[in-house]
Image: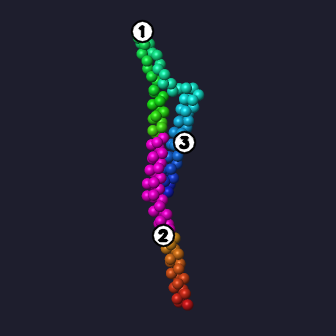
């Protein structure tokens, strides 16, 4: 049950990372090919007056996506070092202890049989 939880967490993280990478790639293509991000001022005419508006919306979107990537990477590392250490290692230790106990019991039986003979 515990291992299933860890697998589900890892799969969800991987899917989220893939989706974000695809979004970042699409934005990069839009920037390079179409030239969506343009920091040159856009001239807007309002009641005869000219107002310069700098297009920074796309830049903000890219910054948000980069921040999201960083958060996901940190989140993944957090799960790797906490959930993995907290769940998988104790399970492994428990299994190794059971494994050791089987051999100890077997050796004890062998020693007992040798002593009887």
Residue 94, visible in the rendered structure: yes
Q: Residue at x 45, y 26 (%)?
A: 56
Q: Which residues are magenta?
A: 69-98
Residue 2, visible in the rendered structure: no
The answer for how far apart the CA atoms under marks 3 and 1 are is 48 Å
For residue 48, the mark is: 1
Relative to 65, residue 4 above or below:
below
Mark 1 or mark 2: whose residue is earlier in sequence: 1
**Crowding at mark 2 (Cα within 10 Å: few <14, some 14-19, many 20+):** few
Mark 3 or mark 2: whose residue is earlier in sequence: 3
Relative to 38, residue 104 above or below:
below
Mark 3 or mark 1: whose residue is earlier in sequence: 3
**Crowding at mark 1 (Cα within 10 Å: few <14, some 14-19, many 20+):** few
Residue 25, image quadrant: top right
Dot 2 corresponds to which residue? 97
Q: Residue at x 45, y 62 (%)?
A: 90
Provide the secondary structure element on which disc 3 rests: helix
Colour convention:
rainbow
97 or 44, which lies in front? 44
Provide the secondary structure element on which disc 1 rests: loop
Dot 3 corresponds to which residue? 18
The answer for how far apart the CA atoms under marks 1 and 2 are is 83 Å
């Amino acid at each position: 049950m515990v291992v299933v939880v860890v697998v589900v967490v890892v799969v969800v993280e991987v899917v989220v990372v893939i989706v974000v990478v695809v979004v970042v790639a699409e934005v990069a293509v839009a920037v390079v090919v179409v030239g969506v991000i343009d920091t040159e001022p856009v001239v807007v005419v309002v009641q005869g007056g000219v107002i310069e508006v700098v297009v920074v919306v796309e830049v903000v979107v890219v910054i948000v996506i980069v921040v999201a990537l960083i958060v996901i990477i940190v989140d993944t590392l957090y799960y790797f070092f906490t959930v993995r250490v907290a769940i998988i290692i104790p399970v492994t230790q428990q299994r190794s202890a059971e494994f050791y106990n089987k051999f100890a019991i077997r050796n004890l039986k062998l020693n007992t049989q040798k002593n009887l003979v």
